[in-house]
Image (cartoon, grey):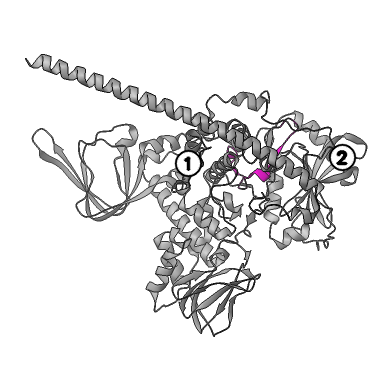
Amino acid sequence: MAAPKCAGTLRDLQLALQLKIEELRQRDALIDELELELDTKDDLIRQLQIELDRHRNVSQHAATSTETANTAPDEPQRTKRQAISAEPTALDPSKLTDVTLTSYCKSKDELIQRALMGNDFMKHLEHGQILTIMDCMYPTSLVKSCCVIQEGDDGSTVYVLEEGTVEVTKQGKKLCTIGPGKVFGELAILYNCTRTATVTALTDIKLWAIDRQIFQTIMMRTGLIKHSQYTDFLRSVPSFQSLPEDILSKMADVLEETHYGDGDYIIRQGATGDTFFIISEGQVKVSQQNLANEDQVMEKTLSKGEWFGEQALQGEDVRTASVTAVGDVTCLVIDRDLTSVLVSFILDVFFTFLCRLQVEADFFSSVSLSDFNIICTLGVGGFSRVELVHLRNETNRSFALKVLKKCHVLDTSQQHHILSERRIMLEAHSPFIIRLYRTFKDSKYLYMLLEACLGGELWTLLRERGSFDDSTTRFYTGCVIEAFAFLHSRGIIYRDLKPENIILDHRGYAKLVDFGFAKKVGLGKKTWTFCGTPEYVAPEIILNKGHDSSADCWSLGILIFELLSGSPPFSDSDPMKTYNIILRGIDMVEFPKKITKSAANLIKRLCRLDNPSERLGNQKNGVKDIQKHKWFEGFNWEGLRQGTIDSPYTPTVKGPLDNSNFDFFPEDTDDPPPDEDSGWDLDF
C-alpha cells in the first residue's frame, strides 16, 4: 500500500511546484511591467531635463553675469572638478625598511589610540599602523588664544588634542568646539593642501602631532614590508618557485590573514576544500587517520613559514589529513580560484609601432611653434590651458595646443608628472587616446601639440542631458575600456578618469585626454603618490597602501554610476568627507532606480573595497572580463574598435576651426616669469 501513497505524495509535490513556478512567473511579469513603466517615466524626465538644459543654455548665452545669479537656488549647477595631486614622494621604497622612526613617551596612550581609532579616516588603517603612528606623534603645547591652524595656510600636520579645548571657525563664523581625545587637520597628511578652517586654543592646550612625511613613511613601509614577507613566503612554496616576479606580486596582493585559537580545526580530513594555507605565526598539528579502523597513521608539526593544503591548488578537493592549531595561529590564505586566475595573468608587454607613423613623425619634426596661429581657447584645467591652433599656411587642418606655465609646474612640484605625461602620450597609439604629435618649449611655457577633437567634452554633454541611458553609457564606457586595455597591457595607469577628461571627436567617439597623472609602473608593481579627483579616488590611494591598475577599475565603476545617474556615488564639498564616504564602500550607497540590476552588479564588482586585486578588470583576462559582463551583452566590441558602429550622439562640427561645442574662456592675460634655466625640462 506504500507505493500508491508515495506516488500521490510525489504528484502533490509536482503540483505544488508547478503552482509556485506559475506564481513566480506572474510576479516576474509584474516586475517587468513595473520596470517598463519606470523606464518610460525616466525617459520622460530625461526629455524634460534636456529641454530644461536647452532653455538654460540659451539663457546663459544671452544673459549677463548678474542675470546668471538669478538662477533658481534649488537647481544644481554642474561645475568642473579640479584634480588633486600630492607632491611626488621623496621616499625611496627600497630604503624604507632601513628608516629609523623616532618614538615619544606618552602618559595617555589609551586616549590617543581611541582618538585615532575613532576618527572617520584613521579608523580604516590597520591596527599596527595606528600603533606606529601613535608612537611617532610628538608633543607640542600652546597657551590660550594661540592659533593652531590658520585658514588659508598650507598644512602638513595632523593633531590629537590631549588636554584643553579649541574652537574651529571658518570665515570668522564658529563651526564647533573640540575637546580632548579628538583628531583634527587630517587632510594635510594626505597631500599638500590649504587649511579650510581656523583652529584656536580656548584654553592652554597639549597636542600630539605627526607630519605628512612620517605618516607616508609609516604607511609605505608597513605595506612594503608585509608585501615583501608575503612574496617571500610564496617564493618558498615549490609550486610557485618557477613563477615570474610580477605573478608572485599579484598573488601576494590577494593573500588574506586568518586567525585560529588553540585546538581549532583548520582542516578536517575527508572534508572538501580549495584553500591553501601558509603559516605566518604559530604552529599547527597535522594528523592522518586510517578511516577503515580509525588508527592514527601519521602526525607532525608545522611552524612559521611552512604550508599545508597545497594539493587543493592542483584540483584535489578532498582533504587527506586534519590540521589543528597548537596555541594561537595566524595563516595566510589563498584559494584555488584566485590562484588559477593569477597564475595565468600574462599581459602583452611590447609596444606596437606602425610603419605609417614614421611619415607622420617626419612631418611634425619639421614644424616649429611659430608656424601655428591660435584660434581660441578650448579648455582650462588646474595645470594647463588648451588652445585651438592651425598651421599658418594650412587652415584645413587644426590641432590642440596644450600650454603649461613653467613657473606653475615648479611651484606645484609637477615636473615628474609632466615629463611622464610626455613619454606616455608619445607612445600611446590608440584610437581611444588623444594623440600627442610633438612638444615645444620656451623660457616661460611648455607646449604639447595634440590631435584636435572638436566634438566637445563628455562633461558638457552630461551637463546638458543630466544623465545617459544604458545604451549611451555603454558606448562611452566601451571607449574608455579600450583605452584602458591599451594602457594596462603596457603597465601604465591613468589615475584621473572623469567626464571632464573624456573628449569627443567629430564622429562622437570618445578619447581620453590629460595624462598628467598617468604613470608607467610596470606589471605587478605599485606606486604611492596621492593624485586624482576626490570623487573618483580609490580607497587604497586614500589609505596610502600603494596602488596599481586596479585604481582605474575603481574609477571606471564611479564613471558608469555618474553617467547613468548624473552624479558620482561619493561626493561632498569637503574633500576629507568625500574620502571618508569612499572608505565606507559602494555597498553603503543607495543606487537610483534608473541604474539597472546588471549595471549595479558591474559597478559593485569594479568597486570592490577590501581587495583591489579582486576587482573586475584586474584579474586573469584584464579588461576582457569587463567586456564579457552581462551589462555589455550584445555590445559590438569589434565594431567599436573599427569605428563602424554609430555613436549615440554625433556632434555638429562645421570644419577644422569650429569651436562651437566648447564653452567660452576669456584670454589669459597673466604673464609668468621665465624659468631660470633649472634644467629639469631638458627631455621635453
Do the residues under discs 1 and 2 have CB atoms within 8 angstroms?
Answer: no
Quarter of the image where the N terminus is located: top left
With 526 as the anchor, is 71 left or right in this view?
Answer: right
Q: Disc 2 marks which amino acid? A: His
What residue sits 65% from the left and 40% below the top? 49
Residue at mark 1: 604
Q: Disc 1 marks which amino acid? A: Lys
What residue sits 81% from the left and 63% below the top? 676
Q: Which mark is residue 390?
A: 2
Q: Is mark 2 on a helix, strand or loop?
A: strand
Choose top left, top right, bottom left or bottom right for residue 471.
top right
Instruction: Give, as a single range, the part of the protein colored magenta.
Output: 488-508
Q: Look at the picture and state if 204 lies above or below 136.
A: below
With 160 as the anchor, is 80 left or right in this view?
Answer: right
Residue 290 within the magenta-colored segment of the rendering:
no
Q: Look at the picture and state if 355 lies above or below 400.
A: above
What residue sits 58% from the left and 82% below the top? 146
With 644 as the anchor, is 609 left or right in this view?
Answer: left
Which-is-in-front pick, marks 1 and 2? Answer: 1
Q: Give the camera-side residue of 199 and 58.
A: 58
Q: Give the camera-side residue of 320 and 10.
A: 10
Disc 1 crowd rating (10 Å Cα; few below 14, some 14-19, many 20+) is: many
Q: Is residue 119 visible?
A: yes
Sequence-wise first label, 1 or 2 = 2
Choose top left, top right, bottom left or bottom right for residue 410.
bottom right
Q: Look at the picture and state if 59 lies above or below 33.
A: below
Image position, residue 565 (x, y; %): 57, 41
Q: Give the camera-side residue of 374 and 350.
A: 374
